[in-house]
């Protein structure tokens, strides 16, 4: 039986997706993906040539990694919609002249499929909302004066992210990508910086961004971002990855756009997984005003210098070699 769908945070009269339902990519060696995301703190379940990325205590499958036949590759992304909005979104796709296509060969449940302007396959399905309906409070308040606040190394434990927050994709034309996802799926622009980067939210209550684009020469997955319970967990996550052989990355720091504290950890294929805490939240009752921000604010308020290879699209590089 299909789960019932709670539509209490639905904004009336706004046919739009409510969630980033799933992201799916393939890698040259799936065992390396299982190790990386297990070390990262996810509940990774491998079945042959596929590994599901879940968070502990949550039944949702946020991501799937497949054993590929070449370099790492973004395969498809999937968005969830309320049943009341599904047909209207499809009508809007058709009105925009977007052709519907066959499901991805790796997809197990066919929804409605189409291709974005950069050639990335996109699925639209009716599904429960997995993007949060409200901002979750901080996990713990500090102890009263007279007590030590920091945990011991032993008591700190392992970091387990609570949920997927967003993905950042490479785009050959950021403005075109924003227009496409706004005009078809009803996503809204949150903030941007010229033609370089843009962040999109869902109008039925969501994080400041569940999808974002950064300028490149073609499509690809830059990072997936996972919500943790505190700034301490961002640092503990960094430590956990240092201790398990994943030293490269960026952070700890704090973004301006979205406001979240971050640590990016570089995966074996040159892209990243992000620990994120305290990202801005946009309730369905608020019309967020999108602004164009200067380049110096597009990345961070404070933190270490951005690594040279942070915005390298390794999927494009692989495509060039293959061509
Ligand atoms: Fe991020």
Image: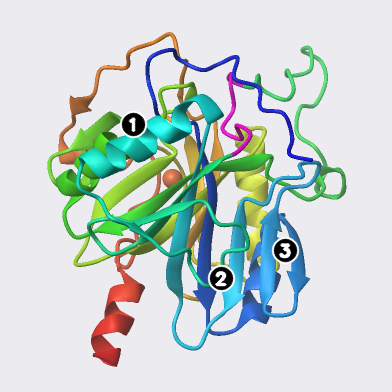
Q: Are marks 1 and 3 in contact (CB under 8 Å)?
A: no
Q: Report the magenta residues as a range.
A: 127-135
Q: Does residue 206 appear left or right of residue 213 in this picture?
A: right
Q: Which residue is mark 3?
A: 38
Name which of mark 2 and mark 3 comes first in the sequence: 3
Quadrant position of ligand 1: top left
Name which of mark 1 and mark 3 comes first in the sequence: 3
Residue 106, which numbered label?
Answer: 2
- Residue at 81% in and 48% down: 153
Q: Measure the alpha-carbon separation of dots 2 and 3.
A: 22 Å
> For this rendering, which residue is in front, 322 or 183?
183
Instruction: State which quarter of the image contains the C terminus.
Output: bottom left
Image position of 282 with respect to 214: above or below:
above
Residue 186, which numbered label?
Answer: 1
The answer to whether the residue bearing label 1 lies less than 8 angstroms from the nearest atom of ligand 1 is no
Image position of 220 with respect to 303: above or below:
below
Q: Measure the alpha-carbon separation of dots 1 and 3.
A: 34 Å
Image position of 312 with respect to 290: above or below:
below
Label 2 vs label 3, nearer the camera = 2
Across and down, in percent, residue 312 comes to: 30, 68
Q: Is residue 198 visible?
A: no
Q: Residues within 10 Å of mark 1 (few under 14, many from 20)?
A: many
> For this rendering, which residue is in front, 21 or 319?
21
Tell me which secondary structure the magenta stretch mostly adopts: loop
Across and down, in percent, residue 254 comes to: 43, 36
Q: Does residue 158 appear left or right of residue 178 in this picture?
A: right
- Residue at 27% in and 43% down: 94
Q: Residues within 10 Å of mark 2 (few under 14, many from 20)?
A: few
- Residue at 64% in and 41% down: 163
């Amino acid at each position: 039986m299909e789960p019932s769908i709670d539509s209490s945070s639905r904004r009336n009269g706004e046919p739009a997706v409510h969630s980033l339902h799933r992201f799916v990519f393939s890698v040259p060696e799936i065992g390396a993906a299982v190790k990386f995301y297990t070390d990262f703190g996810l509940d990774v379940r491998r079945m042959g040539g596929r590994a599901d990325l879940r968070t502990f205590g949550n039944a949702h499958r946020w991501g799937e990694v497949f054993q590929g036949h070449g370099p790492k590759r973004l395969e498809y992304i999937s968005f969830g919609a309320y049943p009341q909005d599904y047909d209207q979104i499809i009508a809007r796709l058709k009105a925009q002249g977007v052709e519907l296509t066959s499901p991805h060969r790796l997809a197990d449940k066919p929804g409605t499929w189409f291709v974005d302007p950069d050639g990335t396959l996109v699925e639209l399905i009716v599904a429960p909302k997995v993007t949060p309906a409200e901002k979750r409070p901080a996990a713990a308040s500090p102890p009263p004066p007279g007590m030590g606040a920091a945990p011991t190394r032993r008591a700190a434990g392992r970091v387990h992210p609570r949920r997927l927050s967003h993905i950042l994709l490479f785009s050959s034309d950021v403005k075109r990508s924003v227009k496409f996802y706004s005009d078809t799926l009803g996503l809204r622009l949150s903030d941007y910086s010229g033609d370089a980067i843009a962040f999109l939210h869902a109008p039925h209550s969501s994080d400041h961004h569940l999808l974002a684009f950064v300028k490149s020469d073609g499509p690809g997955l830059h990072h997936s971002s996972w919500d943790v319970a505190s700034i301490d967990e961002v640092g503990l996550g960094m430590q956990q990855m240092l201790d398990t052989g994943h030293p490269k990355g960026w952070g700890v720091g704090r973004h301006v756009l979205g406001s979240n504290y971050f640590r990016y950890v570089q995966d074996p294929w040159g892209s990243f997984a992000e620990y994120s805490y305290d990202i801005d939240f946009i309730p369905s009752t608020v019309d967020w005003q999108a602004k164009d921000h200067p380049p110096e604010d597009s990345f961070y308020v404070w933190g270490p210098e951005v690594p040279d290879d942070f915005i390298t699209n390794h999927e494009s590089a692989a495509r060039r070699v293959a061509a």
